[in-house]
Image (spheres, rainbow, N blue to C red):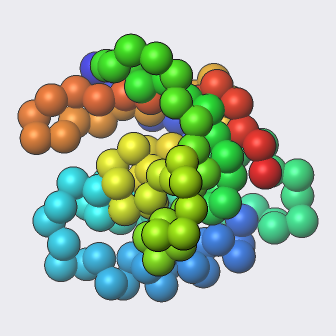
Amino acid sequence: MSTHIPPVFASSDDHQVLVALQKTLEVSTSPGPVLLTAEIARLTVVDPKAQAPFVKIGSRVTYRDLQRPGVRTGRLLMPVDIQSQEDCISLMAPVGAALLGLSVDDVFAWEIQGKPRSVKVLEIRG
């Protein structure tokens, strides 16, 4: 697995929402919340008015899961918003936590239950 960890970003607006969500996850041992908590801790916060070339809450992102065939596209959403949307990626899912804050061409690798996983961001809209 690669030792390079790409930087991750969040707008100050998203950061406030993520920190509030993080407080509810502090006792969770599930893979998604654990990874999300780690990613929130290393976010670089940027001005929300800046044109953000990174995956943020509400972004439609196309990515390749490097351990599985094919390309996937979905909108990164808060867990509460998932029920009414199609093609969604929850921030609480390991892949959602991994995609948060990445830019196009970034590759992020992690392990889940001892198995390597990695994603590469191909396109970001919104």
**Placement of 115 over or under 40, stated as above or below:** above
Q: Which percent across, then down, holds residue 42?
A: 48, 57
Quadrant including the N terminus: top left
**Placement of 41 over or under 1, stated as above or below:** below
For residue 28, side relative to residue 79 (left or right): left
At x 63% / y 62%, what residue is drawn? 57
**Placement of 40 over or under 66, stated as above or below:** below
Instruction: Using the rendered image of the protein, determine whether residue 8 is visible from the camera's viewpoint.
Output: no
Q: Which percent across, then down, holds residue 100?
A: 54, 51
At x 47% / y 77%, what residue is drawn? 80
For residue 12, side relative to residue 67 (left or right): right
Q: In the figure, residue 86 lies in which quadrant?
A: bottom right
Please state which of residues 84 and 36 is positioned toward the viewer in this rendering: 84
Please state which of residues 95 and 5 is positioned toward the viewer in this rendering: 95
**Placement of 78 over or under 89, stated as above or below:** below
Q: In the figure, residue 23 lies in which quadrant?
A: bottom left
At x 42% / y 53%, what residue is drawn? 97
Q: Which percent across, then down, holds residue 55?
A: 64, 48
Q: Which percent across, then down, holds residue 54?
A: 70, 45
User: Farthest residue toward the top?
Assistant: 69
Please state which of residues 41 and 51 is positioned toward the viewer in this rendering: 51
Instruction: Using the rendered image of the protein, determine whether residue 20 is visible from the camera's viewpoint.
Output: yes
At x 54% / y 48%, what residue is drawn? 87
For residue 104, side relative to residue 30 (left or right): right
